[in-house]
Amino acid sequence: MPCNIDPAKPLLDPQDFSPLCIVQTWLDLERKNLGTQVTAMAATDPVTVVYVQRSTAALDGDPLAFDTFAGGAQLRRGDATFDTGQQIKLPFTTAQIALDSCGLAAGGDIRGPDVAPDGDHVVVRGAGRPPATGSRST
């Protein structure tokens, strides 16, 4: 079956196209609609890296352990460029992101940064202080 779906027109009969063709057309359309929100990751393209830095001693080995406070984390960002092979060129300089305006105290438990495709928003799961004795943090 040929894969000549026009995303601007309604799909009259999905049986006329393979499931792979339909999914690939959808992915192509999603990628096109992102426009400049994503990079081709070509050599010298700029990229901002956001990550959590913490002592490995603070972790209990289970990244999904919601009931264990692991303080001392820092949310950090750095501006870098891509190198050949879509690798991030090292080293690059990073700085701590202040989280006090978000209600999180310095040295809190920060995990799982998730960056929006536009790169302007970062969501983290965090706790500013250890839970009170006898209670569980969520």
Image (spheres, rainbow, N blue to C red):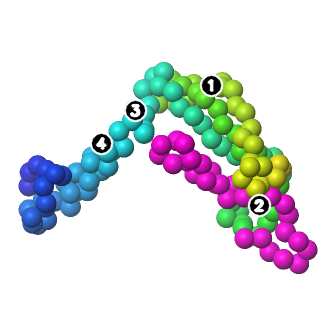
Count of picture labels: 4
Q: Main secondary structure of the magenta part?
A: loop
- Distance, label 1 to label 3, CA atoms, is 19 Å
Quadrant in which the C terminus appears: bottom right
As displayed, is residue 90 above or below residue 103?
A: above
Q: Amino acid at mark 1?
A: Leu
Q: Position of residue 33 (x, y in %)?
A: 32, 45
Q: Is residue 128 above or below residue 67?
A: above
Tag 4's secondary structure? helix
Residue linked to disc 1: 90
Residue occupied by mark 2: 127
| Spot occupied by residue 27 in the image (x, y as percentages of width and height) | 30, 50
Disc number lying in front (1 or 4): 4
| Front position among marks 3 and 2 | 2
State if disc 2 and disc 1 touch (CB < 8 Å): no
Could you tell me how far apart the alpha carbons at marks 4 and 3 are, in whole angstroms? 12 Å
Q: Secondary structure at mark 3?
A: loop
Q: Nearer the viewer, mark 1 or mark 2?
A: 2
Sequence-wise first label, 1 or 3: 3
Q: Examine the structure image and report whether residue 114 is included in the region drawn in magenta.
A: yes
Residue 40 is labelled as 3
